[in-house]
Image (cartoon, helix red, strand yellow):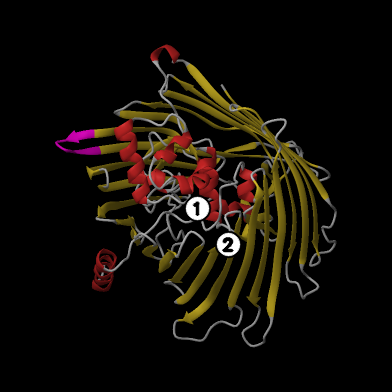
């Protein structure tokens, strides 16, 4: 590390320690109080089809793709309010570190919560509880005479008329024995079956069929001093820069994984709270092996399955020293060995998901502490035969004014596929400042600025965002935000590229609850994208929707919901995309342990830029059943 990098780190640490004002909870920048399913989270995003890559890609929305993945994980694996660490509590919407500390202090003094709403007894939590509720749970410890098996199951079915695909099915089962042993599996009917056709020495990857596969399976044991798992699992440490296969929702340790993304199949062991006087250590070791076989979809007699086309072996360990519950220093190392044994040349953009054959290792340190009301975090990682990466973060909070400061620097050759941190990309350095000010219960403003630069190209981009929330009366909430994205504000001292420019996004939203059982919501988004620096042309897109929800008094537990949505891209050209969607949804909570959701969606998608246009309407039926026992 040269002297300039050392000087940068020292200056940044000094800034974070002495000048960074107080920070807040992680901000998802959207109201999440009405979330009752993964579909509700999906509705907060926009996706468009990439015809070159033949896949759906994230195109914007009220939340980022990273936040969507995190919230989906939190929804499927709610935070246990009785056992969650302050980091895990902090990832709940609207939560702050001071509130997390109060929750921990409250349960240590008064004992575990009996039900999730009991958390409202903690001062300051009642106002944000509607945001927390969809992502929190309480796992009560049962009495000795009550111990035995309990479980939960989720079944999902989705069928789209005239799309040429078989119905999508998903089944998840979790079993818990004596609050110590957890078993689970997840079955899913894949929408595609990856295969190949061979012509001479060339193989072409194809997607031909569907099949049902056992995607997840695990057995997890949790004891006060240790935990162990065999099967599919997740593991995470620090800020996720060195190793994190669980996202920000799991900061330290190992956890069972029954999500449909991220995969570690193997075994892991964690030894917790090894005493060192008043301090303690946590140690974790993990191993996984991920194999991928490629079946042939050819009809000739030479068809066969190619075993272990892609295989990764991974092994690693972590040691974390805890000074107290808010201060720790951790060290993590892992090694990955990837083999690819493919006896043909190949032609497929899909194949890029598999890295080249290689062996690499990554090691790093992470640190966290609290000084008065300021939470400080730092992490450093180095890849063998590669580059360095580091992240510095300050989180503080005053009574009304809040601010977050992050600085990061990832070298060009720091490639780490198992990392999930702020700023996922390698070849980048930058900083982010985010804050809000609450004038009163009616008025709140938020501000955000991020600037980042690529080491290899010297291109610098930045992004601004401002938001205003106003509630003239208790039943109405109005919000407006504007976001500026400027590409190539500096290109190594040269002028901005003519192919990139500024993108401006405006969003207006109104929520109205005239009576307790009725909720109305409307939103309009307008986006302008600079198409050329030398002409005054902008590509203009717009999205609008109206949503209504009504909780019927009888039968009790029945909720009806409907939405109309309109999306139009490149408004002023003849090559835009138009999209209309209508859905009607019914949710019935038969008991606190049985819930059924049925949704009917009518979608009309017209793409003027392709021939023929995809303008045939699609009708989709979705069913989800949740049962606990």
Q: Residues within 10 Å of mark 1 (few under 14, many from 20)?
A: few
**Residue nearest the viewer, comparing 353 with 627:** 627
Question: Can the viewer see residue 485 in this picture?
Answer: yes
Characterize the magenta stretch by its predominant secondary structure.
strand
> Residue at label 2?
472
Image quadrant for the N terminus?
Answer: bottom left
466 sits to left or right of 577:
left
**Residue nearest the viewer, comparing 210 with 301:** 210
Residue at the far left: name it. 277
Question: Can the viewer see residue 202 in this picture?
Answer: no
**Which label is found at residue 115?**
none
21 sits to left or right of 191:
left
> Does 464 appear in magenta?
no
Secondary structure, mark 1, is loop
From the top left corner, tell me how far across and down residue 604 is, in percent: 81, 55
Residue under the image location 72 percent in, 56 percent down: 546
> Badges 2 and 1: C-beta atoms under 8 Å apart?
no
Note whether 280 is above or below 426 in the view shown: above
From the top left corner, tell me how far across and down residue 419 is, in percent: 43, 52
Residue under the image location 69 percent in, 61 percent down: 52
> Does 278 appear in magenta?
yes
**Which label is found at residue 356?**
1
504 sits to left or right of 89:
right
Secondary structure, mark 2, is loop
**Residue nearest the viewer, comparing 237 with 295:** 237
Residue under the image location 23 percent in, 38 percent down: 281
Image quadrant for the C terminus?
Answer: top right
From the top left corner, tell me how far across and down residue 353 is, in percent: 56, 51
Q: Residues within 10 Å of mark 2 (few under 14, many from 20)?
A: few
Q: Which residues are magenta?
A: 274-281
Q: Earlier in the sequence, mark 2 or mark 1?
A: 1
Whole-number angstrom distance, CA of label 2 to CA of label 1: 58 Å
């Amino acid at each position: 590390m040269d002297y300039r990098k050392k000087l940068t780190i020292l200056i940044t640490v000094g800034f974070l320690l002495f000048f960074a004002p107080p920070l807040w909870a992680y901000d998802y920048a959207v109201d999440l109080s009405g979330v009752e399913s993964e579909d509700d989270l999906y509705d907060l995003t926009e996706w468009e089809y990439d015809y070159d890559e033949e896949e759906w890609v994230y195109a914007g929305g009220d939340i980022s793709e990273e936040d969507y993945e995190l919230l989906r994980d939190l929804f499927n694996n709610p935070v246990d309010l009785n056992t969650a660490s302050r980091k895990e509590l902090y990832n709940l919407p609207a939560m702050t570190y001071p509130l997390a500390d109060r929750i921990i202090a409250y349960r240590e003094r008064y004992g575990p919560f009996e039900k999730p709403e009991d958390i409202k007894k903690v001062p300051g939590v009642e106002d944000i509880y509607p945001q927390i509720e969809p992502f929190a749970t309480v796992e009560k410890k049962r009495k000795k005479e009550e111990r035995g098996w309990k479980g939960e199951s989720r079944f999902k079915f989705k069928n789209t008329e005239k799309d040429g695909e078989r119905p999508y099915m998903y089944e998840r089962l979790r079993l818990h024995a004596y609050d110590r042993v957890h078993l689970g599996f997840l079955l899913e009917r894949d929408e595609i079956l990856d295969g190949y056709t061979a012509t001479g020495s060339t193989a072409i990857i194809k997607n031909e069929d569907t099949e049902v596969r056992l995607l997840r399976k695990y057995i997890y044991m949790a004891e006060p001093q240790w935990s162990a798992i065999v099967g599919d699992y997740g593991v995470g440490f620090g800020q996720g820069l060195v190793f994190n296969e669980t996202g920000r929702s799991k900061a330290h340790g190992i956890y069972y994984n029954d999500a449909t993304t991220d995969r570690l199949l193997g075994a892991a062991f964690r030894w917790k709270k090894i005493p060192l006087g008043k301090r303690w250590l946590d140690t974790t070791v993990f191993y996984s092996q991920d194999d991928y076989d490629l079946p042939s979809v050819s009809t000739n007699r030479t068809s066969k399955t190619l075993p272990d086309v892609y295989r990764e072996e991974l092994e690693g360990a972590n040691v974390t020293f805890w000074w107290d519950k808010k201060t720790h220093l951790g060290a993590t190392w892992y090694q990955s060995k990837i083999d690819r044994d493919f006896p043909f040349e190949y032609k497929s953009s899909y194949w890029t998901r598999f890295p080249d054959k290689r062996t690499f290792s990554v090691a790093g340190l992470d640190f966290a502490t609290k000084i008065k009301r300021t939470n400080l975090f730092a992490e450093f990682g180095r890849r063998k035969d590669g580059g360095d990466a580091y992240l510095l973060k300050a989180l503080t909070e005053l009574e009304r004014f809040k601010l977050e400061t992050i600085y990061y620097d990832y070298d060009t050759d720091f490639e780490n596929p198992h990392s999930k941190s702020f700023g996922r990309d390698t070849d980048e350095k930058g900083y982010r400042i985010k804050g809000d000010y609450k004038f009163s219960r009616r008025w709140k403003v938020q501000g955000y600025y991020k600037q980042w630069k690529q080491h290899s190209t010297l291109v610098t981009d930045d992004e601004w965002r401002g938001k205003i929330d106003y509630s003239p009366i208790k039943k109405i909430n109005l919000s407006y935000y504007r976001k500026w994205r400027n590409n190539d504000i500096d290109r190594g001292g040269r002028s901005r590229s003519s192919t990139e420019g500024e993108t401006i996004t405006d969003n207006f939203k109104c929520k109205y609850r005239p009576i307790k059982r009725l909720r109305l919501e409307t939103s309009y988004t307008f986006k302008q994208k600079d198409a050329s620096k030398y002409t005054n042309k902008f590509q203009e897109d717009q999205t609008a929707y109206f949503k209504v929800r009504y909780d019927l008094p009888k039968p009790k537990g029945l909720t009806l919901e409907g939405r109309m949505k309109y999306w139009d891209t490149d408004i002023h050209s003849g090559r835009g995309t138009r999209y209309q969607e209508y859905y009607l949804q019914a949710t019935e909570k038969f008991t606190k342990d049985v819930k059924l959701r049925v949704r009917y969606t009518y979608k009309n998608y017209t793409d003027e830029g392709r021939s023929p246009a995809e303008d045939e309407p699609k009708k989709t039926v979705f069913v989800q059943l949740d049962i606990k026992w």
